[in-house]
Image (cartoon, rainbow, N blue to C red):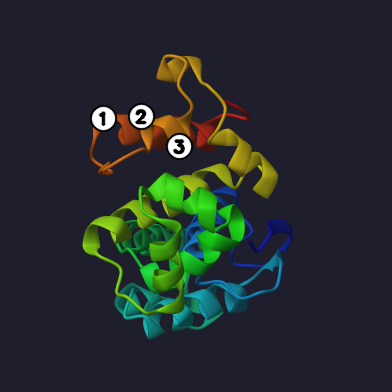
Amino acid sequence: MTLIRISTVEEPFDTPGTVRSAVAFLSRAETMGFLGDEDIDHLNIATVRDVVDAMAEAGLGSGPGALLRIPDDEISGGEIAAVLAELEDILESSPAPDREWPTLDHLFGIQTLAGLLGVSPASVRRYLRGERATPDQIAARLHFLAMVVSDLSGAYNDFGIRRWFTRSRSVLHGAAPRELLAGDWDPDHPGPRKVRALARALLGSPAT
C-alpha cells in the first residue's frame, strides 16, 4: 500500500482541521485504489486534485470535487475540509471492487483475503483478473474490509494491520476480528459491526 506520512503541508491545508480531513480522505482513497504508486509526504492541492480526478474517472464525486478547482486564493481551508468530508462520505458509501481487489490482495495475499471474505481462493483470482464480475454481496464485504483497513492505517504498518485481524480482543469477548468475519457474513451483522467499531476507535486512540 502507498504510505501516507505527511511531513510538509502547504496552504490552504495549514490548519489542524483541514489536515485531519485531508488525511482521512486520502486514507480512504488509498485503500480503495484511488492513489498512485508514490508515497505521499507532501500535502498540497495538487495531491488532492489528483485523487479527485481518479474518483471522477470512476464516476464518483465529480460534483463536490469541482469545488477544488476554484483558485486557491478563493477557497478557505474550512471550505476545503467540508468538501473533503463530503468526498470521504462518498467513498465510504461506494464499493469499487475493480480497484479494491488489487489493493487488498497486495496487503493480505490471496489465501488470507479469501478467508476474510468467505470465498474460495480460486474465486478471488478470477475477480482479480476480471474474469468474473464481483457479486454485490462480495463487493460489500470487500469494501467493508477496505474501510476497516483504512481505519487501521494511521496506527499500523502493513504487518501490523494483518496481525490486528488475528489477535484476540477482550472487547470481542476473546475473539479475534477475523473470527467475526467468517462464513456467509454481512457488513451489517453484529459481529462485523463490532469489528468496524473496534477499528474506528483507533481514530481517536493511539492503540487498541
Q: Residue 62 appears in which quarter of the rendering?
A: bottom left
Q: Which mark is residue 18?
A: none
Residue at which label 1 appears? 190
SS of the residue under disc 2: helix
Q: Is residue 39 above or below residue 81?
A: below
Earlier residue among tags 3 and 2: 2
Decide which of 119, 106 is in the foreground and name it: 119
The residue that label 3 is drawn on is: 200
Residue kind at label 1, given as amino acid type: Pro
x then y, percent, for residue 57: 39, 85
Asked whether disc 3 touches disc 1, contact meaning CB atoms under 8 Å apart, the reply is no
Closer to us: 1 or 122:
122
- State which quarter of the image contains the N terminus: bottom right
| Residue under the image location 54 percent in, 64 percent down | 103
SS at badge 1: helix
Q: Identity of the amino acid at label 2? A: Lys
* Residue 59 falls in image quadrant: bottom left
Q: Are marks 1 and 2 in contact (CB under 8 Å)?
A: yes
- Residue 194 picture quarter: top left
Is residue 139 shown left or right of residue 70?
left
Q: Residue 203 at x, y = what percent? A: 52, 38
Question: Which residue is rendered at x = 45% and y = 21% of the image?
Answer: 175
Mark 3: amino acid: Arg
Disc 3 to disc 2, C-alpha distance: 10 Å
> Is 158 placed above or below 55 here?
above
| Quadrant in which the C terminus is drawn | top right
- Residue under circle 2? 194
